[in-house]
Amino acid sequence: MSDQTPSRAQLRRTLRAQRRAVSAGTRRRATRGFARHLPGALGVRRFRHFGVYQAGDGELDPLPALAHSRFGEVALYLPVLDRVHRGRLHFHLWRRERRLKANRFGIGEPRRRERARAAWALDAILVPLVGFDDRGHRLGMGGGFYDRALADLARRPRRPRLIGVAFEFQRQPRLREAAWDQPLDQVVTDVRRYLLS
């Protein structure tokens, strides 16, 4: 790794600023592009329990893609911050007809604590990110919430498919690795999908 390579913190700041600067029109087109590519990334496998997220901080919004018929009978789960253990999150059932409430970061969570499901027990999780590379490494927001939630997947009886969600410009030639990184299986952008494993 060259000394010229920016640190993870520097790269995070740059990419977050770029992401927030995306215009409303470009964002709408990117959301439609992502929605076109997501079904192909899922293949023919059936998914019953699917982790999603509410976009914030300029993230690409994955929720319009869930209008696809593939998600008609799928139970959706949103990340919810643990009220007792700071820095941890859990996945709770999201009933789409019910309103959400904002957590301390302004991100929507189910108002009532619906049924929780462990990350390893989900079939797939759409994972937000700040940057990614072709080896499946993900640069997150820096809080470590997803890293902690996914940390013990290797010890579990099954593992969900981890699908990163990003704008194409978030792709990097190579990210500095961190010991806690959980590799992504795929990334779906507004332009294409990347199979990483």
Image: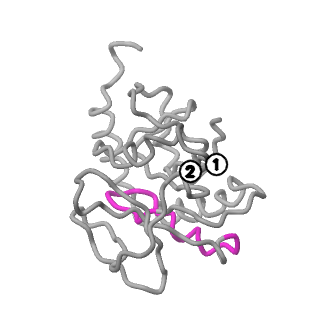
Q: In this figure, what is the number of numbered marks?
A: 2
Residues shaded magenta: 53-70
Q: Residue at x 64, y 47 (%)?
A: 193
What residue is disc 1 on? 192
State which quarter of the image contains the N terminus: top left
Towards the viewer: 18 or 49: 49
Q: Is residue 170 left or right of residue 84?
A: right
Residue 67: in magenta span: yes
**Residue that lies at the very extreme toward the right in this rendered image:** 44
Q: CA distance from mark 2 to mark 1?
A: 5 Å
Circle on res. 189: 2
Q: Report if residue 57 lies within the magenta region.
A: yes
**Res 133 label:** none
Q: Quadrant of residue 48?
A: bottom right
Across and down, in percent, residue 99 comes to: 37, 84
Is residue 157 left or right of 28 when viewed as pictured? right
Question: In the rendering, at what x and y percent does residue 74 appear?
Answer: 63, 72
Q: Residue at image x 51%, y 42%? A: 153
Dot 2, how many residues are within 10 Å of its Cα: few (below 14), some (14-19), or many (20+)? Answer: many
